[in-house]
Amino acid sequence: MDLSIEDLNNLHLDVLREIGNIGAGNAATALAGLINKRIDMNVPSVKILDFNDVSAVLGGEEIVVSGVYFEVDGDIEGNIMFLLDLRSAKVLTNILMGREDPSNELDEMDHSALQEIGNILSGAYISSLSSLTNLNIKISIPSLCIDMAGAIISVPAIQFGYMGDKVLLIETILQDGNDTVKGNFFLIPEAKSFKTLLNSLGVYT
C-alpha cells in the first residue's frame, strides 16, 4: 500500500525536515565552491504544503519566476523544482559572473548560468539524500523556464493523477555580503516513494 503525505506522522515529518536541512546545507556548500566565495545560509524553512499553495509561496500565480525543473528516478520517482524570483535570479547570476547589473533582465548568459546553478544545487541536494538513505537516486538534465509561477508549476501538476497533491518545500535564504538570494526547492515524490524513503531510514512501520 502506498503512503501519502496525509499518512505521515510527526516523526516522519521531522525526519523529512532534517533531510531537507542537510540537503540545503550541502547545496549551499556546493554553490560556495562554484563561485569560490563564502556563502552564508540561514536555517532553511522546511514545510509540507498543498500543491495548490505553491503559487502563493512564490507571491501569486502571475508573478514571473525562474524555474529549473528535473525529473527524479531510480529507487524513488518524482520531480524537483528550484524556483527563484527574478531579483534573486539576477543577484545569483551577478555573483556567479562577478558583475553588477542592477536590472532584472535575464539574457542568454544568465539563462545558462541559472541552469548550471540549478543543476549543481539540485545535484548536491540529491547526492546528500542518496547518501543518507543509501538509495540510488538520479536526476534528469535540467530544464529552465522563465514564466509566471502558475504556468511553471503546471508541469508537475500535469502528472497530478499519479503523484501526491502535496509537496515538500525547502525555503532557503543565501547571503553574500549585502546580497540576498531566496531560493525554493520543491520535492514532489510519487506516493510510493515516501514509503521507500522512510523505510530506508528505518522510521516507517
Image (cartoon, grey):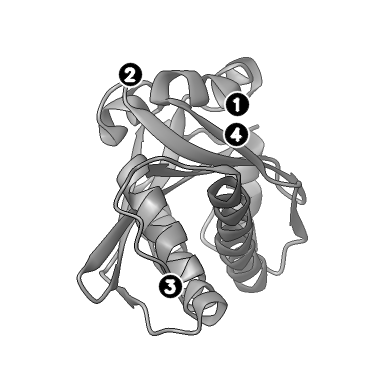
Q: Dot 1, how many residues are within 10 Å of its Cα: few (below 14), some (14-19), or many (20+)?
A: many
N-term mark: 1 or 3: 3
Q: Nearer the viewer, mark 3 or mark 4?
A: 3
Left or right of residue 111: residue 149: left
Q: Nearer the viewer, residue 159 or 56?
A: 56
Gap in Å between the C-alphas at discs 3 and 4?
26 Å
Left or right of residue 8: residue 191: right
Circle 2 SS class = loop
Circles 4, 2 touching at the beta carbon (< 8 Å) = no
N-term mark: 2 or 3: 3
Gap in Å between the C-alphas at discs 4 and 2?
29 Å
N-term mark: 4 or 2: 2
Circles 1, 4 touching at the beta carbon (< 8 Å) = yes
Circle 3 SS class = helix
Gap in Å between the C-alphas at discs 1 and 4?
6 Å
Amino acid type at image mark 1: Met
Gap in Å between the C-alphas at discs 2 and 1?
24 Å
Q: What residue is pinned by disc 1?
A: 163
Q: What residue is pinned by disc 2?
A: 62
Q: Residue at x 57, y 54 (%)?
A: 118
Q: What residue is pinned by disc 4?
A: 191
N-term mark: 2 or 1: 2
Q: Nearer the viewer, mark 4 or mark 2?
A: 2
Amino acid type at image mark 3: Gly
Rendered location of residue 196, percent (x, y): 66, 50
Q: Nearer the viewer, mark 1 or mark 4?
A: 1
Q: Nearer the viewer, residue 21 or 29?
A: 29
Q: What residue is pinned by disc 3?
A: 25
Circles 2, 3 touching at the beta carbon (< 8 Å) = no
